[in-house]
Image (tube, helix red, strand yellow):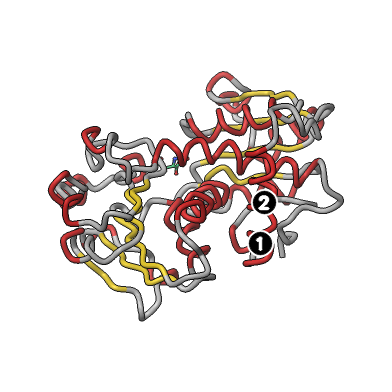
């Protein structure tokens, strides 16, 4: 089964294959690849989403397929006490692929164990968000060569943010110096770090040196401790910090933003976060193309 649960299912070659497919879709006239014309996607979201659910929806529509959207599970049988496993087994009868977002780490793997159709992990709590990391890497690839040494700052709530967990694993496949920028209570989990990573309390320590700044918001919905939240004030980027950055640095953010990324930076040509959201649509089309238009998908089966 072609579940896509983790970036661990990719290597440099399969990423190159996926990006080649993404570029093919990007440059072809709209409607060229209707490879999903009889396919149905279920978008099953137990947590809020704008970009992930809408871009998967749009990707499926552009490849000719249709979508069942369950974006508010309080209106589904979940509110009657139905388990994730039961909901998945039911929706697998009605659809050919399920994108699942759920607050529990490991939930996508649980769903995959009972599903007869591919599960795509659209974010499992603090675990992973593999398709976001792929679109983030695609955005980096569009502006920087992944064949050259790069330096990247991952900034903000590195403990609870799943996008940085998946992205960091992908970046490890390339020659990338990692700068981890966060207050003490928000550190990257130790199992994801390496001794050569450089740690900073805020961006002043590395903004001059990096090719990419990847901002993240505080994942308030995953934090119960109010004193912890106070620690993270003032870690964001500013006009003043942007003046210290390289002219060819790119500024990224998975969005939504809160106050760590002021809107006054939107006009800076180095800001790529809206372009990133557009790349999400392209990469997700390539993922569906890989599932429905190719004999086997680019990524490895779940081990
Ligand atoms: C991210 C997520 O859900 O983890 N959002 C997204 O998919 N673009 C980031 C976030 O919510 O902060």
**Ligand 1 has an atom within 8 Å of the beta carbon of the residue at disc 2:** no
Crowd around label 2: few <14 · some 14–19 · many ≥20 (10 Å): many
**Mark 1 CB lies closer than 8 A to ligand 1:** no
Quarter of the image where the C terminus is located? bottom right
- Dot 1 crowding, Cα within 10 Å, few <14, some 14–19, many 20+: some
In this rendered view, identify the residue nearer to me: 146 or 95.
146
- Upstream in the sequence, badge 1 or badge 2? 2
Query: At x 31% / y 67%, what residue is drawn?
Result: 179
Residue 4 horizontal/vertical position (percent): 67, 51
CB within 8 Å, label 1 to label 2: yes
Instruction: Give the farthest residue toward the bottom.
Output: 195
Residue 280 point in image, percent of width and height? 54, 40
| Left or right of 276 in this view: 121 | right
Res. 257 image quadrant: top left
The residue that label 2 is drawn on is 4
Numbered circles on residues, count: 2
Determine which quarter of the picture holds residue 93: top right
Q: Is residue 249 left or right of residue 202?
A: right
On screen, residue 226 above or below 137? above
Percent coordinates x, y for residue 5 in the rendering: 63, 53
> In terms of depth relative to the viewer, which is nearer, 19 or 80?
19
Q: Nearer the viewer, residue 138 or 37?
A: 138
Q: Which residue is at 48% across, 37% downward?
A: 277
Q: Is residue 229 visible in the rendered structure shown here?
A: yes
Helix, strand or loop at mark 1: helix
User: Which sits in the foreground, 122 or 197?
Assistant: 197
Q: Tell me the tag on residue 39.
A: none
Q: Residue at x 17, y 51 (%)?
A: 243
Quadrant of the displayed image that contains ligand 1: top left
- Relative to 303, say whether 101 is above or below: above
Q: Which residue is mark 1?
A: 9
x and y percentages locating residue 259 in the rendered image: 22, 37
């Amino acid at each position: 089964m072609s579940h896509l649960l983790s970036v661990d299912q990719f290597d440099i070659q399969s990423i190159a294959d996926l990006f080649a497919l993404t570029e093919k879709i990007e440059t072809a006239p709209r409607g060229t690849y209707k490879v999903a014309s009889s396919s149905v996607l279920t978008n099953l979201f137990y947590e809020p989403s704008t970009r992930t659910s809408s871009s998967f929806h749009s990707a499926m529509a552009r490849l000719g397929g249709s979508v069942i959207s369950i974006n508010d599970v309080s209106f589904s049988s979940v509110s009657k006490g139905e388990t994730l496993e039961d909901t998945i087994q039911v929706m697998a009868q009605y659809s050919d692929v399920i994108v699942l977002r759920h607050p529990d780490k490991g939930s996508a793997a649980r769903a995959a164990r009972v599903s007869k159709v591919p599960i795509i992990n659209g974010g499992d709590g603090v675990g992973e968000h593999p398709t976001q990391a792929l679109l983030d890497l695609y955005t980096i690839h569009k502006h920087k060569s992944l064949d050259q040494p790069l330096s990247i700052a991952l900034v903000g709530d590195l403990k609870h943010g799943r996008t940085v967990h998946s992205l960091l694993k992908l970046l490890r496949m390339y020659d990338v110096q990692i700068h981890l920028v966060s207050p003490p209570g928000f550190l990257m989990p130790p199992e994801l770090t390496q001794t050569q990573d450089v740690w900073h309390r805020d961006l002043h320590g590395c903004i001059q040196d990096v090719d990419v700044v990847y901002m993240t918001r505080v994942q308030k919905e995953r934090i119960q401790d109010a004193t912890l939240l106070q620690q993270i004030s003032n870690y964001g980027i500013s006009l003043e910090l942007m003046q210290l950055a390289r002219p060819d640095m790119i500024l990224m953010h998975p969005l939504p933003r809160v106050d760590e990324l002021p809107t006054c930076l939107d006009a800076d040509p180095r800001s790529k976060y809206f372009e990133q959201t557009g790349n999400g649509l392209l990469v997700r089309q390539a993922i569906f193309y890989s599932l429905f238009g190719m004999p086997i998908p680019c990524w490895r089966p779940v081990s």
